[in-house]
């Protein structure tokens, strides 16, 4: 059961405390950052996926650039769903690396097929 598993993980994370306790230490923010880091690991794999899709000419950098606004919208919707807090700052902190990695993926797609649209029309 997924809810039981996620509840147990949340309870375990709530029991974690820093090795050096301080009074001004806000553990909730650190837990959110750590959870967010675990959730963004898939974004690093995204560049590898884009590399192979661009190599097979399924997607191009031009197509990714044209759909940038929809990708940013999808990234912020995903961030709003995944982040456990309700403030916008944490959502933006979670979405910013994903938008940056999307930009890197556009660069990867361009490096695989630079000027792909122009070469295809010349043939």
Image (cartoon, rainbow, N blue to C red):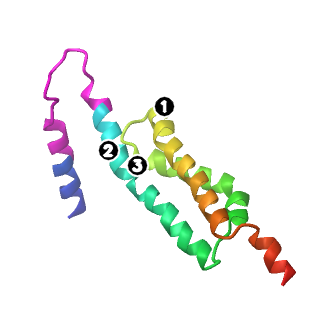
Q: Would residue 46 appear left or right of 107 to someone viewing this image?
A: left
Q: In the rendered view of the protein, which quadrant contains the C terminus? A: bottom right
Could you classify mark 2 by the number of other residues whose Cα lies within 10 Å: few (under 14), some (14-19), or many (20 or more)?
some
Residue 4 at what x, y percent from top left?
Answer: 18, 57
Residue 35 has which mark? 2
Q: In the rendered view of the protein, which quadrant contains the N terminus? A: bottom left
Q: Which residues are magenta?
A: 10-29
Sequence-wise, the earlier of marks 2 and 3 is 2
Magenta-span inclusion, residue 122 = no
Residue 89 has which mark? 1
Residue 112 at what x, y percent from top left?
Answer: 63, 69
Q: Residue at x 32, y 44 (%)?
A: 35
Q: CA distance from mark 2 to mark 3?
A: 10 Å
Q: Residue at x 60, y 50 (%)?
A: 73
For mark 3, what is the residue? 82
Whether tag 1 and tag 3 are in contact, CB under 8 A, the answer is no
Label 2 SS: helix
Q: Quadrant of residue 118?
A: bottom right
66 or 44, nearer to the observer: 44
Could you classify mark 3 by the number of other residues whose Cα lies within 10 Å: few (under 14), some (14-19), or many (20 or more)?
some
Residue reaching furthest top? 23
Label 1 SS: helix
Residue 32 at what x, y percent from top left?
Answer: 33, 38
- Rendered position, 28 above or below 13: above
Magenta-span inclusion, residue 15 = yes
10 or 59, nearer to the observer: 59
| Number of numbered tags placed on the structure image | 3
Q: CA distance from mark 1 to mark 3?
A: 14 Å
């Amino acid at each position: 059961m997924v809810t039981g598993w996620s509840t147990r993980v949340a309870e375990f994370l709530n029991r974690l405390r820093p090795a050096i306790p301080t009074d001004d230490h806000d553990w909730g923010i650190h837990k959110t950052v750590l959870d967010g880091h675990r959730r963004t690991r898939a974004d690093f794999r995204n560049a590898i996926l884009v590399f192979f899709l661009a190599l097979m000419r399924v997607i191009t950098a031009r197509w990714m650039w044209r759909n940038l606004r929809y990708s940013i919208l999808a990234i912020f919707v995903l961030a709003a769903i995944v982040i456990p807090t309700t403030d916008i700052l944490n959502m933006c902190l979670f979405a910013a690396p994903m938008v940056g990695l999307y930009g890197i993926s556009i660069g990867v797609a361009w490096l695989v097929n630079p000027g792909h649209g122009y070469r295809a029309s010349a043939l």
